[in-house]
Amino acid sequence: MELISPPGYGAVVPFNKETHSQLGIIEEQRFSFSKDLNALFITVTEFVQAAKNYPIVFSANESATEFVPMLVTGLSAGENRFVDDKGNWEQGVYVPAYVRRYPFCVVEINNEKDSAAQQLICVDESALSNEAQPFFDNNGEPGEGWQQFQNFMQEYEASRIATMAFTSKLVEHDLLEVFEARAKHTSGEEYHMINMYRVNEKKLNKLSAKVLKELMAKNYMYFIYAHLMSLDNFQSLLDRQKTD
């Protein structure tokens, strides 16, 4: 069974209580895995907090039928402007849940005999060490750190499902449009980002009262406006660009 690792992760394996019980997370350079990612997955429940620091856009599959929200961390591929060389995320800036869940992730396994996909907790073993605080004690009982991670993973998966419902509603009402961002640094260097999607405000304003009421009841309007306001953060990203 081949497991596909999330962007930035190394090879992931199923988390095993026996194999990994006496291992813990290497806290030093904890977020280094994301230093080459200029866009990160984000869940809808993070929109309001993330909108204070990052542009939030949508990315589409090849057929542009399915979308996922992303927060932009840099204007150039391979550059995350919020994590330093030591793996520290900038203080005072919201740290995305995608980053905080590392080195764990959930992989869905499709069983031919069962139509429902099974969820498997996996881990990037390169982030583990037997010199770190172990997940389990000598009696096999989970430590506080592991319990916190379990709870966090459950919350993250619930948020991911809620995000899928949100983006599906945007697609249903044809609210997403493709756009590009162009910027020029004071150094003269130009940046061009394409294949991003945003909510079309004109179409949003033309929705019927019934649809708007539905979106408001689900708090979707709250998330939509957080997304739209976040787009102003492209300018602050430009200010972060370094000259080599």
Image: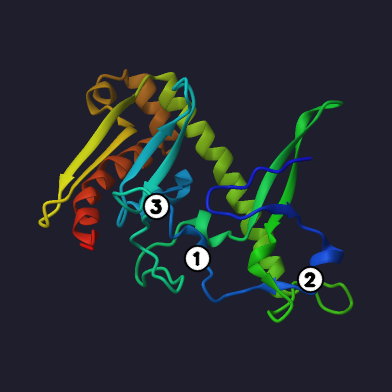
Disc sitting over residue 85 in the figure: none
State the residue position of label 2: 142
Query: Which kind of residue does numbered mark 3 sit on?
Result: Gly
Position of 194 relative to 240 (above/below): above
Looking at the image, is mark 2 or mark 1 nearer the viewer?
Answer: 1
Picture coordinates of residue 30 (x, y %)?
54, 69
The residue depicted at 68 percent of the width and 69 percent of the height is: 128
Horizontal side of 155 relative to 181 (left or right) equals: right
Quadrant of the rendered image containing residue 242: bottom left
- Distance CA(mark 2)–CA(mark 1): 24 Å
Depth order, front residue of 124/57: 124
The residue depicted at 42 percent of the width and 39 percent of the height is: 219
State the residue position of label 1: 31
Of the image marks 2 and 3, the number of the one nearer the N terminus: 3
Looking at the image, is mark 2 or mark 3 nearer the viewer?
Answer: 3
Picture coordinates of residue 143 (x, y %)?
75, 74
Query: Which kind of residue does numbered mark 2 sit on?
Result: Pro
Kind of element beneath mark 1:
loop
Q: How crowded is mark 3: few (under 14 residues within 10 Å), some or many (20 or more)?
A: some
Query: Which kind of residue does numbered mark 1 sit on?
Result: Phe
Horizontal side of 130 relative to 29 (left or right) equals: right
Disc sitting over residue 78 in the figure: 3
Looking at the image, is mark 1 or mark 3 nearer the viewer?
Answer: 3
The residue depicted at 30 percent of the width and 20 percent of the height is: 207
Picture coordinates of residue 222 (x, y %)?
35, 41
- Distance CA(mark 1)–CA(mark 3): 15 Å
The residue depicted at 41 percent of the width and 26 percent of the height is: 170
Of the image marks 2 and 1, the number of the one nearer the N terminus: 1
- Distance CA(mark 2)–CA(mark 3): 37 Å
